Image (tube, rainbow, N blue to C red):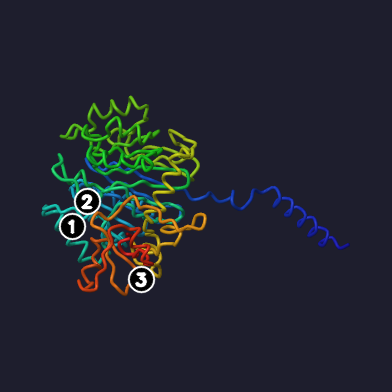
Amino acid sequence: MAPHRTKLKHLRTWAFSLFLLLPSAGALWATPLLEIHFLYIGQGDAILIKSPAGKVAIVDAGPPSAKRILTRYLEKLQIKRVNLFLVTHPHLDHFGGWRSLQGKFKPLLYIDPAFPYPSPPYRRFLRHIRRAGIRSYTGKINQVLDLGGGVKLRVLAPRKPFLKNTRSDANSNSIVMRLEYKKLRVLLTGDAEKPTEYRLMRHPEWLPSHLLKVAHHGSHHSSSSRFLTFVRPTFAVISCGKHNRYGHPHKRALRRLHRASIKTFITARHGHVIARSNGKTLWLSIRGRSKAQALHTLQLKTLPQTYQRAISSSMANSSAAAFGGAIYNPSGPPLGQQAEKPKWYRHKLRGKTIVPPTPFPSSKGYVAAKRSSVFHRHSCRQVQHIPSKLRVYFRSRRAAIRSRRKPASDCIP
């Protein structure tokens, strides 16, 4: 055999042996992680969420002084576009840094609770959102924002009618969400106060989480002991500024967190707090450190079966709207709309047709057009376009479904 052929044969054998020794392709390339950045931007809130699919959501943008910090942070992470910008409530320390999202970071979608708030800075901010052509929507209870890669933000509050005559109506009607990614649960509470917590505790199946963003910068008006027993987080993050004039975080709130054995991080003390997860493990770091330099590592556990059953039943009956198609798939259904599957509102059991109740009934009943195959909530905007002579009224959702009509996809009755 020719010498060059012998060398070539040995070379092929060596290359094949090396290939067998190498790890699989999946191990060569690190799996993308979910990242949640609780930014230190002074006295305010700013949370950056990056899904494994690369989609970016900004929850609040801090005070006006946070503009440079937020811009530099986005550039450092090499983020080219913000897919979702959500403002939990109309206070300046939560939307003041919006100018950092101009230009190349222009959001594709904007969401707020639509709480009426007569503030000149807030009006100017909304005017800019409208002139920039950013699609704007109202955050409503039981909506689901799909961030791709299996990451979802489930809206838990506010619920209409808005809370009134509270210590701060704007705070009490904050958007509260729970981030869900495989086993991971993170509760984001905005500036929600005790009246909001009382509403949320009516649905205890929504609250258990591994990580809690403490409401209202650690104010003593939030994070009641009973609420913490419902959430049962392992870690908590408080976003506030150093030596702020409000005295945040308050000693009472810190005492309640300590008594509940919750490891608490404060941005004024620890800087940026970063949570990373693959859905099975949670790594918690501070000051921009990597996963390898994480201070705490938590192996995630699945929620108790009682909570799982309650979540599956309540969410199936309420038919939460999937936002993923509208945010990331222009050809998908409009925002907040998803055709209900028959099993969600009607199924058969032992030959009988069963209509499961909804946890969010329409207090004033349901309305449909005489020749229409769908029915709406009484408060739905589409009802205004139905002539009064052609309207059919139903006292209950069950009666509307028994008329062989389907729930409308816009108001999701």
Quadrant (top left, top right, bottom left, bottom right) of the N terminus = bottom right
| Residue 8 shown left or right of residue 96 in the figure | right
Say if mark 3 contacts mark 1, CB within 8 Å: no
**Coordinates of residue 366 in the picture (x, y in percent):** 27, 61
Residue linked to disc 2: 95
Please identify the quarter of the rendering in which residue 215 is found: top left
Question: Looking at the image, how many numbered discs can be counted on the residues?
Answer: 3
Quadrant (top left, top right, bottom left, bottom right) of the C terminus = bottom left
Regarding residue 42, the answer to whether it shows in the image is no
**Coordinates of residue 309 in the picture (x, y in percent):** 45, 44
Say if mark 2 contacts mark 1, CB within 8 Å: yes
**Coordinates of residue 30 in the picture (x, y in percent):** 53, 49
Q: Give me the residue at 45% from left, 58% from top.
A: 353
Callout 2 secondary element: helix
Residue linked to disc 1: 125
Residue linked to disc 3: 373
Q: Which of marks 3 and 1 is nearer the N terminus?
A: 1
